[in-house]
Amino acid sequence: MADVTARFFAIHPHMGGNGYVWWLALPVLAARLGLAMRVEWTVDRRPHGPEFSLALQWYPDHPGILADQLRRWCAPVS
């Protein structure tokens, strides 16, 4: 999921526009990967901010940081 997210933001790296599209696409991507959105993930709490932006910038050298950011919003389906 981290790789797909990083590739998506690399296409057009503007957090404002892409952030909203990604925010809508994240539940679909998560479901395809067998994940569910955590209850903390709501319309009002978009999963992008300074930490997420840094995780995207550092992804090539430190992919685990972006994966950790995504875990804040997605969990394995049980």
Image (spheres, helix red, strand yellow):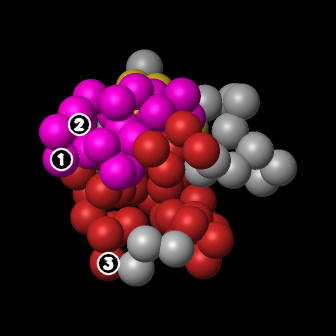
Residue that badge 1 annotates: 60
Image check: 22 left or right of 49?
Answer: left
Residue 11, label in figure: 3
Q: Is residue 51 magenta?
A: no
Callout 3 amino acid? Ile
Helix, strand or loop status at disc 1: loop
Residue 51: image location, x then y, percent: 54, 38
Q: Residue at x 69, y 50 (%)?
A: 46
Helix, strand or loop status at disc 2: helix
Residue 65: image location, x then y, percent: 34, 30
Q: Nearer the viewer, residue 71 or 9?
A: 9
Earlier along the polypeptide chain: callout 2 or callout 3? Answer: 3
Q: Is residue 63 magenta?
A: yes
Callout 2 amino acid? Pro
Image check: 21 left or right of 43?
Answer: left
Residue 66 quadrant:
top left
